[in-house]
Image: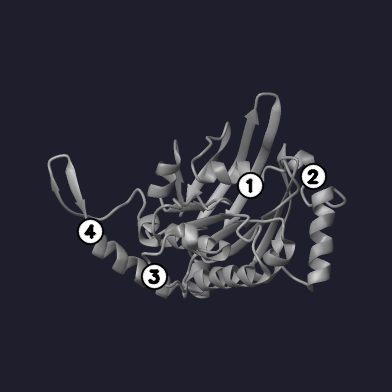
């Protein structure tokens, strides 16, 4: 894996991304590089620009300046559907699941398999969707009683797992996770982190936004820190957990900065 990915361009490059909301400068020329098969932890205090940067990558926002390169090719997204068609999926903190539908229906929501059509009427292939969902969950080692189980009956950890499974179901190149372990129990957090490790083992490229620095430490390859809309740190994760946490906090509060303002303004 390592020898083949070294010769490939990064799966994602974001260059000089700027975004303003009126007088508020949310992003002030941010660069981001995500190599193939890497887990990047994106951290920063509230209003640092993390979610804005990822909403640009996932097509929800359009940058005022800058460019996005996907697998070596420039891309332009005008909507989340555009980004999804290019293989970029985002798993939101609220999971964005339909609680009244079962697991299989949620995995295929908006991309339902059709058995046949009669004019404007389409007949869905429920059997195919259920079988594909079973295979997907087995591949990701996600355990549920039945894919026909309503999402509203699942635990928080199981809902997060289903949301992640849905994001990977259609050959996603990049998976963005927004606070994937927020409000979960300790046991559920462990299972979600195991799922992230499994995705990486299967070749996924992942960006995780999280305030839980210990999660980034345990599953991440690299950490990038934003502060006030600028990148202030971008380096491999190293050292013990205490050193890592102290270093991250120092960058988040402005005590350290690897990128002087003159270089990114």
Real-space Cα separation, disc 2 to disc 4, in angstroms: 56 Å
Q: Which sits earlier in the primary sequence, circle 1 or circle 3?
A: 1
Q: Quadrant of residue 245?
A: bottom right
Foreground pick, 168 / 260: 168
SS type, badge 1: strand
Res. 43 in view: yes
Residue indicated by mark 1: 31
Compared across the picture, whether 81 is left or right of 64 comes to left
Residue furthest to the top: 22
Q: Which residue is mark 3?
A: 146
> Which residue is tagged 4?
125
Where residue 236 sits: x, y (%)? Answer: 69, 65
Residue found at the far left of this picture: 118
Mark 4 against mark 3, which lies toward the viewer? Answer: 3
Q: Residue 98 at what x, y percent from top left? A: 44, 50
Mark 4, Cα crowd under 10 Å, few <14 / some 14-19 / many 20+, is: few
Disc 3 crowd rating (10 Å Cα; few below 14, some 14-19, many 20+) is few
Q: Position of residue 228 (x, y in %)?
A: 75, 40
Could you classify mark 1 by the number of other residues whose Cα lies within 10 Å: few (under 14), some (14-19), or many (20 or more)? some
């Amino acid at each position: 894996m390592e020898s083949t990915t070294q010769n490939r361009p990064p799966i994602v490059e974001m260059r000089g991304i700027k975004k303003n909301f009126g007088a508020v400068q949310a992003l002030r020329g941010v660069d981001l590089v995500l190599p193939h098969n890497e887990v990047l932890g994106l951290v920063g205090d509230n209003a640092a620009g993390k979610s804005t940067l990822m909403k640009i990558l996932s097509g929800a926002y359009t940058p005022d300046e800058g460019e996005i390169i996907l697998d070596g090719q420039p891309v332009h997204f005008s909507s989340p559907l555009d980004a999804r068609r290019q293989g970029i999926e985002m798993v939101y903190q609220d999971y964005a699941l339909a609680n009244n539908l079962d697991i299989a229906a949620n995995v295929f929501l908006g991309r339902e398999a059709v058995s046949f059509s009669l004019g404007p009427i389409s007949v869905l292939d429920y059997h195919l969707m259920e079988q594909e969902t079973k295979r997907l969950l087995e591949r990701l080692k996600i355990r549920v009683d039945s894919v026909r189980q309503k999402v509203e009956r699942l635990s928080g950890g199981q809902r997060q797992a289903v949301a992640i499974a849905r994001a990977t179901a259609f050959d996603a190149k990049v998976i963005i996770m927004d606070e994937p372990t927020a409000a979960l129990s300790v046991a559920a957090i462990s299972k979600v982190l195991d799922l992230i490790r499994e995705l990486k083992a299967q070749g996924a490229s992942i960006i995780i936004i999280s305030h839980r620095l210990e999660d980034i430490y345990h599953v991440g390859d690299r950490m990038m820190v934003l502060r006030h809309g600028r990148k202030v740190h971008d380096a491999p994760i190293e050292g013990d957990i205490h050193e890592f946490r102290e270093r991250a906090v120092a960058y988040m509060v402005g005590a350290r900065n690897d990128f002087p303002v003159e270089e990114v303004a």
